[in-house]
Image (cartoon, helix red, strand yellow):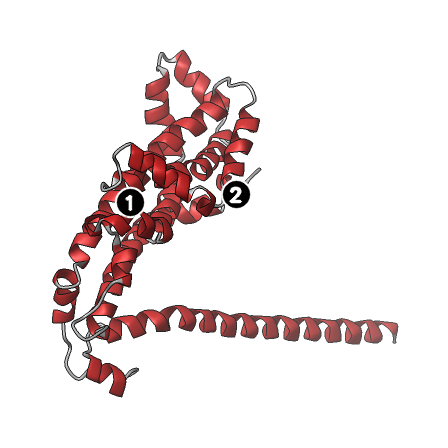
Amino acid sequence: MNNNIVKKVSRKSFDNTFKGEKKTKIFAMIFTLLMILLVIFPLFFIVNTSFKNNQEFYTNIFGLPDTWRFENYERAWVEGKIGMFASNSLIVTVTAVFASVVLAALAGYALSKMYIPHAETIISVLMCLNFVPGVAIYISLYSQLNAFGLGRTLWIMILPYLAWQIPFSTYIYKKFYDSISMEILEAARVDGSNEINTFVKIILPLVQPATATVVVFNFISIWGEYLWASIVSSASTSIRTLPVGLLYFRGEYGIEWGPFAAAICIIVVPLVVVFTYFQKYFIQGLTSGAVKG
């Protein structure tokens, strides 16, 4: 009789557990679908709108366009000067990201694998700099860069972006370098490899996830930055970047939603390309050494 009771209790416990797991899976599936819709619908709406004129936008806002107006992209590129703004954004972003990767990779390696007194204190100070609000130094920074004659050049954006990205980028690289055994470096040195060859040929290939993480984070941060770009480009329209240029996007009679949406699509494309290219290593970076310590 006791065995029957135990079996019934065990069966009931198993059924309750199974039902609980089933409800959790259903809830997780519904939640995932909702998140997918929240991400996909705005993208669909923007792409769909980019092929409409204003009349179709107001009369059939969610439906497919009657006529697919590919010329909206040409109008956005030429009439809206998105081509010039995209060129500026590309130069600023690629230069700042490339420089931040090089400097952060070298700094992180030095702090991790070379004898530098108080290395942990240095990295802590660098990280504390990230908590200083950018707006607190905008006025003095703008004045100083203008005094150096950089006011109407792209360098007035490149240099601050580079400085703002280095602390966190250095931290990411250092945490990855910390996970690499010193035995690898010692073996390379015994074989006669100098420090530069060891760093370039042995260490850098091992920290590809860190590089991907830094590139993706920095590219997204710089490509979409608006506040500093709007301040420094107020004196010259020739150095406006895409986020600033989009704000001033106007047709002859106000905003034309088709070309405006086409301009947004142009802005989003490089972000999708960069993330897609680095996706594999980026996910590895988020789930490994960069989040340790």
Residue 160 x %, y %: 36, 39
Relative side of 113 to 233, left or right: right
Which quadrant holds residue 18?
A: bottom right
Q: Mark 2 points at which residue?
A: 131
Q: Nearer the viewer, residue 290 or 85?
A: 85
- Residue located 30% across and 57% down the image: 243
Q: Write the residue at 21% across / 52% down.
A: 237
**Residue that sits furthest to the right in the current view:** 1
Q: What element does badge 2 sit on?
A: loop
- Residue 239: which numbered mark, if any? none
Type of amino acid at the residue the image marks with label 1: Thr
- Compared across the picture, whether 86 is left or right of 188 comes to left
Judge whether 290 appears above or below 19 on screen.
Answer: above
Quadrant location, the C terminus:
top right
Position of residue 277 in the picture relative to residue 214 (left or right): left
> Where is the N terminus found, in terms of image quarters?
bottom right
> x, y percentage for residue 30?
50, 75
Q: How many C-alpha atoms fall within 10 Å of the one at disc 2: few (<14), some, or many (≥20)?
A: few
Against 212, residue 188 (above or below) is above
**SS assignment at label 1:** helix
Question: Total marks drawn?
Answer: 2
Marks 2 and 1, how far apart at CA: 22 Å
Image depth: mark 2 or mark 1 in front = 2
Q: Residue at x 33, y 26 (%)?
A: 200
Question: Is 100 in front, or is 279?
Answer: 100
- Residue, disc 1: 93
33 left or right, relative to 153: right
Q: Which amino acid does label 2 sit on?
A: Phe
Q: Does residue 211 appear anywhere in the picture?
A: no
